[in-house]
Image (cartoon, helix red, strand yellow):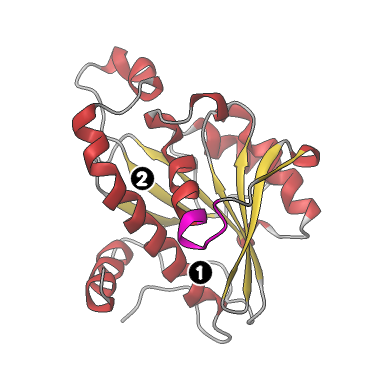
Amino acid sequence: MNRSGLGLLWSRLSRGMSRAGPEPRPPGKRWLVAGLGNYRLQGTRHSVGMAVLNQLAKHLNVADQWKRQRQCCADVAIARLGEAELVLLKPRQFMNVNGHSVAQAAKMYQLAAEDIYLVHDELDKPLGKLAMKLGGSASGHNGVRSCINCLNSNVMPRLRVGIGRPTHPGAVEQYVLDRFTAAEQERLPPLLEQATEVLLSHIRQRSLAGTACTSPS
């Protein structure tokens, strides 16, 4: 995606954002990006956040550097983005207790809640749609709720990745635990790359000293 295309995408994603958000951080800042999901069920709709993290690691040339970190019960890879350091994290726990891994990693790397990005699936957006949310409630997402409870804060920025919602309300639980259909899998690669670009754009913006985390004009 060229810069003009990414700028247009960023503008669209940012329209619904609140102008209140985490404070900017100086160059050299460390950030944590956590892909929420069920570690043993990667490849399912509910674990699309982990798929984004895999793509992010590939984009940053650290895809072969994932290491199991027992202290936070997660797979961790460290990457550079200019002067900033990114801690990429995939919890090795069930979705509803992902927050334990995220909170422990925050302690290990001395990070505050506003330094942490959460990437997760979003039922209320169709596949292919992305949205950045600057803090707020969990909106019914168990992984986000776990992170809020364990960090005792709800200020974490979140990239929500649309997976669509089944037509029958009673089918939601099985739907999120199912793998993407063959047709959906064909649409995943550009979506994961787009999600990566949105994340990196947002982190770059916040890493610039004196640049507020607000919607671009």
Q: Is residue 179 magenta?
A: no
Circle 2: residue type: Val
Q: What residue type is labelled 1?
A: Ile
Quarter occupied by the C terminus:
bottom left
Side (left or right) of 135 relative to 3: right
Q: Quadrant of residue 78?
A: bottom right
Q: Residue 82: where, in percent of width, then height?
A: 56, 78
Q: Residue at 25% across / 65% down in the picture?
A: 12
Q: 184 or 168, which lies in front?
A: 184
x 42%, y 70%: residue: 201
Q: State the mark number for residue 203.
A: 1
Badge 1 density bin: few <14, some 14–19, many ≥20, Cα 10 Å: many
State which tag comes first along the sequence, 2 or 1. Answer: 2
Q: Name the residue under label 2.
A: 161
> Is residue 62 rendered magenta in the image?
yes
The quadrant of the rendering that contains the N terminus is bottom left
Residue 162, percent across and down?
31, 42
The single residue placed furthest to the top in the displayed view is 170
**Does 123 sit above or below residue 89?**
above
Label drawn at residue 27: none
Disc 1 is placed on an element classified as helix
Q: What element carries label 2?
A: strand
Q: Give the range drawn in magenta.
A: 57-63
Q: Residue at x 52, y 74 (%)?
A: 206
